[in-house]
Amino acid sequence: MLVAVTATAVLPAGLASANLITNGSFEQDAVGSTTITGFAQQSNIDAVIVTPAVSDGSQALQLSAATTSSSRGRYGSFVNDFGSGVGVDSTLLTIGQEYRITGDIQQISTEGNSYINVNQEVNGPGGRSFPAIAVVEGEAGVIKSLDETFVYNGGRLRLALQLDGFGGGTGTVTPVARFDNFTLTVVPEPASLALVGAGGLALLGRRRSA
Ligand SMILES: [Ca+2]
C-alpha cells in the first residue's frame, strides 16, 4: 500500500489524463435527450442520446438525418467548439502544449456519410482558416477511431461530429451514425511519462500481488 500511495503522490499536477472535453462519452444526459451537454447543434440534423454505448459507458450520441428526394442533402454537425464557450474552456488549453484527442464513430446506416472532424484555427497572411487536424470517415457497421496528437496554437479548436444525406439519386435516405468516448488530454513530457510508467507499474504490481 505504501508503494501505491508514494507513486500517486509524485505524479505531477494535471498529469492524471484529465479529459478536457465536457460530456465526451455522452453519459451526462438521459437516454432520449435531444439536448446534448457540451455540444452545440449547427444545423437541422436530429440528435438523441441512445443506449447501448459505442465504446464507453452505457450511452452514445446518435445523429440521424432522414430526408426525402425533395429535400435530399440534409447536412449538419454537432460541434464542440473550444473557443466559443461550448465544451472545453479554451483558457484551459496552453499554447505550445501537445494534446491528444480521441473518439469513436460508428455509422449505422449504409446510406449517407458521417465524419469526425477536428480543426484548429490558423491566422495566416491569407486570413483566418480552419485546416483539419484529423478527419475520420464513418463506415457502415464498423467502429472507427480518432486518435491524433497536435500542438495547441491558441486558435479556436473545433471537434465536429458530422452527418449528411448527400448521395445523389431520388427517394428516401436515412443516414444514421453514433459517436462516443471523446477525450482531449495533455500529452505528458517524456520525463514525466517515464515517471507515470514506473508509478503505473508499481500500482499494477501491488494490485496483482494483492
Ligand atoms: Ca458513452
Image: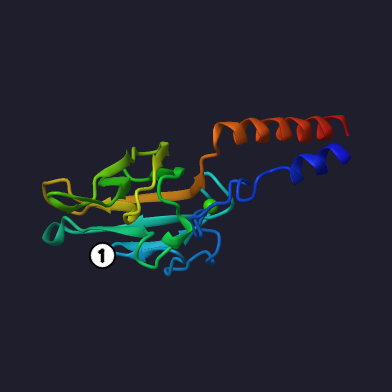
- Quadrant containing the C terminus in the rendered view: top right
- How is the model colour-coded? rainbow
Residue 62 falls in image quadrant = bottom left
Q: What residue sits 55% from the left and 39% below the top?
A: 188
Front residue (pair 127, 62) = 127
Q: Let me know if residue 1 appears in the view.
A: no
Compared to residue 149, the image places residue 65 above or below, namely below
Q: Let me know if residue 82 appears in the view.
A: yes
Residue 140 falls in image quadrant = top left
Compared to residue 143, the image places residue 80 above or below, namely below
Q: Is residue 204 left or right of residue 98?
A: right
Q: Amino acid at mark 1?
A: Ser
Instruction: Measuring from the top left, give residue 12's x and y in whole percent.
Output: 65, 45
Q: What residue sits 30% from the left and 49% below the top?
A: 120
Instruction: Measuring from the top left, give residue 201's x and y in whole percent.
Output: 73, 30
Q: Is residue 27 left or right of residue 85?
A: right
Return the residue at label 1. 43
Front residue (pair 145, 200) = 200
Q: What residue sits 51% from the left and 40% below the top?
A: 187
Q: What residue sits 51% from the left and 59% below the top?
A: 23
Quick one: label 1, few (<14), some, or many (20+) residues within 10 Å?
Answer: few
Instruction: Measuring from the top left, give residue 130's x and y in whole percent.
Output: 24, 50
- Quadrant containing the N terminus in the rendered view: top right
Secondary element at tag 1: loop
Residue 70 falls in image quadrant = bottom left
